[in-house]
């Protein structure tokens, strides 16, 4: 994989590691998706978070571990209920879209 998903700071492990805006946008989006999916799926070591809590936690990672533009775009789309149908229809999500914001 030429550009594996990376956390935003792109902490340099080697001299050739990419950082910040050098990381391709698609890799930054995939990094956000990996985090969101991990929070919204039950695993052997953790229960799924309610969607609203996952959104709050992701916002806390903005600019630290996740790209601020990607997080802001997701948060805006979530706030406008653009993900409701997707969240409700995803098998194995572990959280119903109706749980968001206590509805």
Image (cartoon, rainbow, N blue to C red):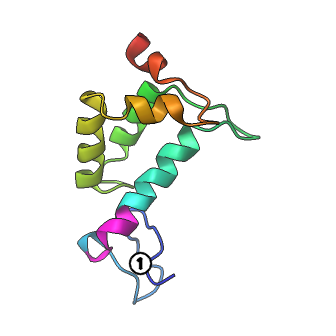
Q: Position of residue 74 (x, y in %)?
A: 30, 43
Q: Decide whether the magenta segment is chiefly helix, strand or loop.
A: helix
On screen, residue 74 above or below 84:
below
Q: For the view shown, which residue lies furthest in the top direction?
A: 103
- State the quadrant of the C terminus: top left
Density class for disc 1 (Cα within 10 Å; few <14, some 14-19, many ≥20) is few
Residue 97 is situated, as x and y percent measured from the top left of the image, at: 46, 24
Above or below: residue 93 compared with residue 6: above
Q: Residue at x 55, y 37 (%)?
A: 90
Total numbered labels placed on residues in the image: 1
Query: What residue sits 46% from the left and 84% below the top?
Result: 2
34 left or right, relative to 62:
right
Q: Secondary structure at mark 1?
A: loop
Q: Which residue is mark 1?
A: 12
Q: What x and y, as percent, mark residue 47?
A: 66, 31
Could you say which quadrant of the image residue 57 lies in?
top left
Q: What segment carries the magenta color? A: 22-28
2 vs 96, nearest the viewer: 96
Q: Residue at x 56, y 26 (%)?
A: 95
Q: Report whether 2 appears left or right of 66.
A: right
């Amino acid at each position: 994989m030429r550009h594996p998903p990376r956390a935003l700071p792109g902490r340099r492990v080697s001299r050739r590691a990419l950082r910040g805006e050098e990381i391709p946008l698609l890799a930054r989006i995939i990094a956000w998706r990996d985090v969101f999916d991990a929070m919204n799926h039950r695993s052997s070591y953790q229960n799924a978070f309610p969607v609203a809590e996952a959104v709050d936690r992701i916002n806390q990672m903005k600019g630290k571990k996740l790209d601020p533009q990607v997080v802001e775009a997701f948060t805006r789309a979530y706030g406008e209920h653009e993900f409701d149908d997707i969240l409700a229809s995803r098998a194995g999500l572990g959280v119903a879209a109706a749980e968001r914001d206590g509805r």
